[in-house]
Amino acid sequence: MDKILIEGGRPLQGKVRISGAKNAALPILAATLLCGGVHRLRNLPRLRDIRTTKTLLYHLGATFEEGEPLCIHTDDLDSFEAPYDLVKTMRASVLVLGPLVARFKEARVSLPGGCAIGARPINLHLTGLERLGVKIELRHGYVEATAPRLAGSRIHLDIPTVTGTENLMMAAVLAEGRTVIENAAREPEVVDLATCLTGMGANIDGAGSPVITVEGVRELRPMDHTIMPDRIETATYLVAAGITRGDVTLGPCSPEHVEAVMRKLEEAGMQFTLTDDSIRAVGGEVIHEVNVKTMPYPGFPTDMQAQIMAMMALAEGQSIITEGIFENRFMHVSELRRLGADIHIEGNTAIVRGRPKLQGAPVMATDLRASASLILAGLAADGVTEVSRVYHLDRGYEAIETKLSALGAKIERAKE
């Protein structure tokens, strides 16, 4: 098992390339199951979750031609089952449910796993599919779905679930008639999936708004699509520039996708220069305290809560960080305290009293974004920080130690 060693105290300087978005790539990979043929995907990030999804598609009968673009052949699928051994490591595996039911009228998918950041049930996926005419049974830890006929329907989501919106959208594109998804997730990754599906011949309107309308079509054609830049990786490197008082230019990226994060970082003293596809981020001499509440897009993303907490640990003054999405996403707090952070938890709120310095120490990553927060804190801490269990990090950040090294960080990967 790998660990990452960081000698902190170096301002980051230079340019960093932003990879394709993991959370856009995963549903789009699942969408290749919707029709046979050769699908072409560009800008796929090299991540553990991508490898897991490719393994799952291979298990279902897909084959691959590696390269840029990645070519995925889906003519000869011979299985409709996503087994526990593959699904347990990655919650997004449940995204194959909608496409399999839409194309083959049946699927058997293990209940999902993934990061331990709180209960993320898929009941909204299942009740939505039932509205489309899918018969759902839960047996021995598996979802067994059958649908002799899919028919469009009106579906209201109790909460704007991203993967739920994506699963239902993929199922609805081959249903008979019109499907309306109300209280849909508005995240850019949902829009990227809708753009991809539209390129395949689907008829989708309203992606990026709370109401998505899908007019079912009889068949689709293979995709040829370029994955959008990763907005969470973009935002993480913005914080890296701020926490080290650095000067970093990021691209290609979509500045409009990280507006909520940039607003808070400007309050904290950072300055930004934008183009259509790049951001120059300059840290201030002083980090000012900010208050943050995570919310569904376009609000401040829950996937950036841990990272901005690391930065606020070095702010002048007291910050209040409220987690509005998940009920168990403060597991990084105890590890940040090991570095000297002053953080007190009250329910779903963290009170962060900034300190002048953090001190390097051995810490352990508990989930993907917690891993990033510890890396960021280590970049700013005095001495050496040793981050163990970085396999979480490899699920969502491509070559992070290589990219940070190119910006002047003293960071290396080593074996435990």
Image (spheres, helix red, strand yellow):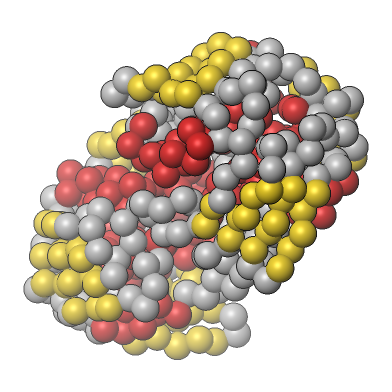
> Which quadrant of the structure image shows residue 278?
top left
Residue 368's x, y, as percent?
64, 48
Q: Quadrant of residue 120?
A: bottom right
The residue that appears at 37% across and 78% down in the rendered structure is: 158
Relative to 131, does residue 285 appear above or below in the rendering? above
Residue 291, percent from left and from top: 56, 51
Q: Quadrant of residue 210?
A: bottom left
Residue 58 position, x and y percent, is 48, 50
Q: Residue 119: x, y in percent?
A: 59, 73
- In the displayed structure, would residue 216 be above or below residue 278? below
Q: Is residue 214 left or right of residue 412?
A: left
Can you see residue 122?
yes
Residue 407 in the figure: left or right of residue 33: right
Residue in the picture at 77% in, 53% down: 343
Q: Is residue 383 above or below residue 349?
A: above
Quarter that holds the C terminus: top right
Residue at horizontal 48 percent and vertical 51 percent from the top: 301
Asked whether residue 17 appears in the rendered view, the answer is no
- Residue at image point 52% right, 44% down: 50
Of 198 and 352, which appears nearest the observer?
352
Q: How many marks?
A: 0
Q: Is residue 214 left or right of residue 23?
A: left
Q: From what the image shows, is residue 301 above or below residue 410?
A: below
Q: Nearer the viewer, residue 257 or 179?
A: 257
Which quadrant would the N terminus be assigned to in this image?
top right
